[in-house]
């Protein structure tokens, strides 16, 4: 793997387990790479769920000027201005669109029976400014169940297909270990890749995207159409190895 001119990373199930902060060692690797090339995090999480330690350590980097935080599936972009994180751009869903999305999820769950008999741990709907995320087992699901509840992704695929049929005018993508995300058409991670490429004046094929959901229907899959180089990962452990490779190649 040669050194890209910029690197983009998914967060959930790539740099960290879903809904959890990145480990201190992972943050250190990201900051080391930032010393060499521009780095962007492209995540379905909203800004408030990124993690205080991560944001504090990035803002303290002498190279923070080349760090980009693209949240809510790249519907928003934040950068550090020397005193605070400020919003560079933002898209948003209307209250009517959010209610329609919630109704579609509830009807699809009832129609398919995909979640029948499963426990729910906390809130299932995570409403953000530009995205509605549905966590099948709730955002408080224990880690052991998070990775074993749906062997082969059969239940989530069934629900995902029903949601896509119900919301043909919106973008429906799978992310993390239990979630399905909905945004406006065209407001996705490919949008973020194109925006960053234009901002940095770097062609997408000269950049690298690392994510766990680069399979069809996954919320990382859409970046492939931009021509960016991609590297799939099975989770944070493999991502740490990928970062170590990049640190050698970009030395």
Image (cartoon, helix red, strand yellow):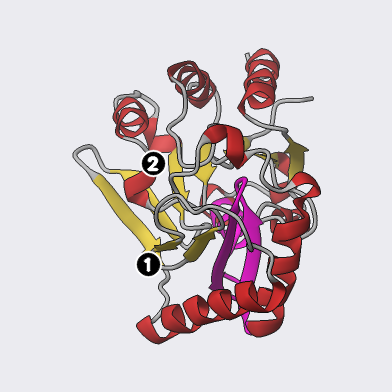
Per the image, label 1 sits on a secondary structure element best described as: loop
**Which residue lies at the image location 56% right of the left edge and 74% below the top edge?**
105
Is 189 colored magenta in this rendering? Answer: yes
Classify mark 1: residues with Cα within 10 Å, few (<14), some (14-19) or many (20+): some
Answer whether residue 168 is visible to the viewer in this image: no
Q: Which residues are magenta?
A: 167-196
Image position of 113 (left or right of 227):
left
**Which residue lies at the image location 60% right of the left edge and 51% below the top edge?**
178
Q: Are marks 2 and 1 in contact (CB under 8 Å)?
A: no
Lower sequence index among marks 2 and 1? 2
**Which residue lies at the image location 78% right of the left edge and 56% below the top edge?**
154
Q: State the CA–CA distance, disc 2 to disc 1.
A: 15 Å
Compared with 73, 103 (above or below) is: below
* Residue 107 or residue 134, whichever sits in front: 107
Residue 25 image position (x, y, % from top left): 48, 15
Is 169 colored magenta in this rendering? Answer: yes
Compared with 53, 136 (above or below) is: below
Q: In which quadrant of the rendered image does the C terminus lie?
A: top right
The mark total stands at 2
For residue 194, what is the image quadrant?
bottom right
* Res 129 label: 1
Q: Residue furthest left?
A: 83
For residue 67, what is the image quadrant?
top left
* Residue 130 or residue 156, whichever sits in front: 156
Classify mark 2: residues with Cα within 10 Å, few (<14), some (14-19) or many (20+): many
* Res 50 label: 2
């Amino acid at each position: 793997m040669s050194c890209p001119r910029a690197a983009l990373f998914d967060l959930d199930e790539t740099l960290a387990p879903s809904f959890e902060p990145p480990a201190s060692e992972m943050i250190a690797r990201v900051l080391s790479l930032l010393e060499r090339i521009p780095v962007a995090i492209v995540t379905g999480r909203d800004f408030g769920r990124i993690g205080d330690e991560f944001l504090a350590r990035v803002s303290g980097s002498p190279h923070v000027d080349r760090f980009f935080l693209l949240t809510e599936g790249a519907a928003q972009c934040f950068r550090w201005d020397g005193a605070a994180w400020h919003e560079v751009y933002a898209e948003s869903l209307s209250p009517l669109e959010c209610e329609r999305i919630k109704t579609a999820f509830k009807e699809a769950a009832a129609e398919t029976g995909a979640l029948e008999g499963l426990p729910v741990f906390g809130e299932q709907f995570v409403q953000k400014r530009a995205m509605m995320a549905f966590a099948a087992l709730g955002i408080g699901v224990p880690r052991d169940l998070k990775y074993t509840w749906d062997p082969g992704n059969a239940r989530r695929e069934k629900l995902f297909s029903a949601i896509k049929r119900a919301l043909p005018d919106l973008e429906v993508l799978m992310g993390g270990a239990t979630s399905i995300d909905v945004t406006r058409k065209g407001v996705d991670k490919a949008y973020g890749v194109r925006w960053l490429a234009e901002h940095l004046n770097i062609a997408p094929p000269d950049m690298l995207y690392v994510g766990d959901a680069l399979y069809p229907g996954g919320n990382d899959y859409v970046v492939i159409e931009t021509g960016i180089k991609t590297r799939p990962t099975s989770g944070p452990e493999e991502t740490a190895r990928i970062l170590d490779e990049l640190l050698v190649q970009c030395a």
